[in-house]
Image (tube, grey):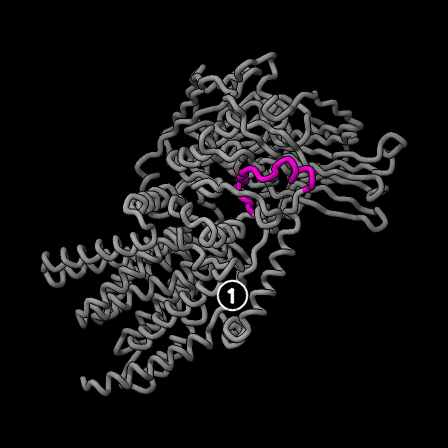
Amino acid sequence: MNTNLIDKENIKNTILSIVISILTFPKFEPDFTIGLDSPYMWALNYLFLNNYEFLKHLIFPIGILGFLKHPVVVGNCVLYAVIFFSTVKFLFVFLLLKLAQTPSLRKWIFNIVLVLFVSAFINIDFAIIGSCIFLLYFFSIQRNHLLFILPVLLATIGLFIKSSIGVNSFGVILVFFIHNLFDQKNIKQTLIYAGITVVVVFLTGITIFQNATLLVNAIWSILMLVKGYSSALALFPENNWMFLSIFIVSILSVPFLFKEKNSRYFYFLFLLPLFFMWKHSILREESSHYSMILGFSIIFWIIVVISLKQIKPIHVIIPILSIGFLWGNLKYIDSNARFKVNLSGLKNFSEVFLNYKSFIERNQKISKENIKPSRLSKDMLQKIGKSTIDFYPWDFSYVPANNLNWKPRTTLQSGAFSEWLDLESAQNFTKEEGPKFILLHVVNDWNYGLLGSNDGRHLLNEEPKTIIEIFNRYSIVRKEDDLLLFKKDSIDKFLPALIVGTDTTIWNKWVDVPSFDDAIVRAKLICKGNIVNKLKTFLYKGEALYVDFKLDNGREISYGLVESSAKDGVWVNPFIQNPFNNTVEPKVVGIRFRCSNTFMYSPQLIINWEKIGIKDSNGNSAALTLFSKNQRDQKEVLKEKYFDFERNDGSENNHYTNRISHSGNISNIVYADGFSQGYEFSLDTIWNNTVSSINVEAEVYYNSYEVKNCVLVFSLEKSEGSDFWESRKLNISNNDWNYAFIEKRINKDEFNKGLFKVYVCNPNKTKGNIYIDDLRVRFIKQE
């Protein structure tokens, strides 16, 4: 081809790339706040500027260069990130335009529209992975070694920005090696490319880590994180498998329906990244993660279509069906989900590049306002002083809010994916390595407790090794609002752990808990997945696991569970939900393990009971001193009502059956779009001079062979302005009786009168019965 023509095309594509990049420039929002995600984003930016040496040891899915993906207003991090993103996006758009070149004006205009559409939602992940694909494609044509070195460089940088970016990008490179080997049939050439890859990765890594050992450790840590990602972070919403099956079949159909050489080549380059993106999105199946596979699939189909010289109707129909059905399944995950396409690029570009100073100042102001809730009291700050401190489980916003002397742990936040990661986390709290203080902040859980964690799990079961290390080395020295301050002790508190018994059981069966009031009791679960489980976990995800605790007050409580953590010990006793008061909480007397599909596991479970004694124990309640629990609960039950449904009391909606029951012979049927027998109570009759606040508790057992959920309801009517309707969704996880509990605090000043109701509602509009039994309601006096 004429050199002048090539130069003209490159100039035209360069100008077009700049214009398209500006028109589709994304909205940057670099403020930070409190919570789970924003604090780690702030931490990555803060540490990059203030403690880069620590980042070299970081073991976290977002890497040493993570600020390039999540910039916040710390120093010049936003500027660096914007420049990096703009450069990579320009490269992506330029290469896509180069691919879109065609002699046909109509086809060229069609391609430009597709390029504009893709550019409107491109993020740093897609830009890096896509650029690697384009560069390797053009390298396969031109054999210019710079076109091979660049994608390896991008993949390496991507790996240290976020592990998933690197894994996807190196997946492209791996497929290129395999395709090149079979296409060229030249082993020597492929080995040379592999050698170049190793050299580029090493030189880039050495530049970033400045130490070969740290580089190797970082790559090893990333591989271990990827290996353990599956079970720990999985969510289990309902899917429309007809929609997902059509999507999968459409992807697999490409080699048969898109027969041009270029389209097939792009298909193979995309194959591993598509699978990895599928795994990443479908594991953590919420709208933000699911949108990744949706966006990446759109890019895949557009590139395949652009690569075609001749487009047939089938080449348009298949992508539309594929994306449409994948999008349709998103509505089952989150009915309010929206796939955002950027339409304000020019405004966004102007805000960042033309008004950068005011842009930064505004986001700094927003950030300062956002972290105000993390300001500590004078007494707490005086207690901490200038000593080193870390935060558990994950909110670091206390550092910028109070200018504290933060000593971060190498795993940054809680949430161990595996035994290996838990051990790494625990090593940060040893006598030698641990900070002087740990500030633990509250996370509310599904069971009205204050020690919650991710995805319905209990904090004491999230990182078993780390938790034991913390309580062995640290003691609570201050309780304030929703915070616990731990201080490092001079000596260890725990005796060596002992296995004091073993139970062999099955799923969904209650097991008695051995009683040791002077020690911590944990259950180490051994369960073995079968070959079908392993295959399903590889292609999709594993099963949801749960642990149920039966308390000595009759209540049952359920939490999510990660298999690898359960193997290291499920904290059983002393059972703690509220560490902020000094009241001894109910004791766990029974434990049960459940699985979303027991077919995927061996039916036999083994529970090894672990006892961890306390040194210098002076009594039977030694373990409770870990939480300063020294007062017995003195609940005053003002009123209690129990329904066993064994006899008809003349109430409305009182449909009974002897077909199924939890206790006795009779249960209450709740028909579709109907209500159970319930309890009504006039609220104004309970208030007097000594009662101004109550806690209402209700518990019920429920079952159904036909529907998946129901609702337990508290409502207040005729209160003259203070009516409420509060519900708790009750998931029916198996064909057995499920337990539910709901509570609400009610104050006389706010709710002086009204008709208080408790009942179960069946929200299924057309069909499906629910059975309830043993409904109990209590009104408990509060001080």
- Relative horizontal placement of residue 682, taking residue 120 as reference (left or right): right
Q: Amino acid at mark 1?
A: Phe
Quadrant showing the N terminus: bottom left
Query: Relative to 340, does residue 233 appear above or below in the rendering?
Result: above
Number of numbered discs overlaid on the protein picture: 1
Part of the protein shown in magenta: 377-396
| Front residue of this view, candidates 100 and 294 | 100
- Relative horizontal placement of residue 144, taking residue 57 as reference (left or right): left
Query: x, y (%) of residue 712?
Result: 66, 40
* Residue plotted at (40% across, 71% down): 118
Q: Quadrant of residue 453?
A: top right
Q: Secondary structure at mark 1?
A: loop
- Relative horizontal placement of residue 26, taking residue 254 as reference (left or right): right
Query: Relative to 766, does residue 457 appear above or below in the rendering?
Result: above
Query: Relative to 405, does residue 577 appear above or below in the rendering?
Result: above
Where is mark 1, residue-wise?
Answer: 28
* Residue plotted at (28% across, 68% down): 134
Badge 1 crowding class, 10 Å Cα cut-off, few under 14, some 14 to 19, many 20 or more, is some
Q: Is residue 354 magenta?
A: no
| Front residue of this view, candidates 211 and 725 | 211
Query: x, y (%) of residue 77?
Result: 47, 60
Q: Is residue 391 magenta?
A: yes
Quadrant showing the C terminus: top right
* Residue plotted at (29% across, 43% down): 213
* Residue plotted at (56% across, 34% down): 437
Q: Quadrant of residue 214?
A: top left
Query: x, y (%) of residue 634?
Result: 74, 22
Which residue is the extreme one toward the front?
Answer: 386
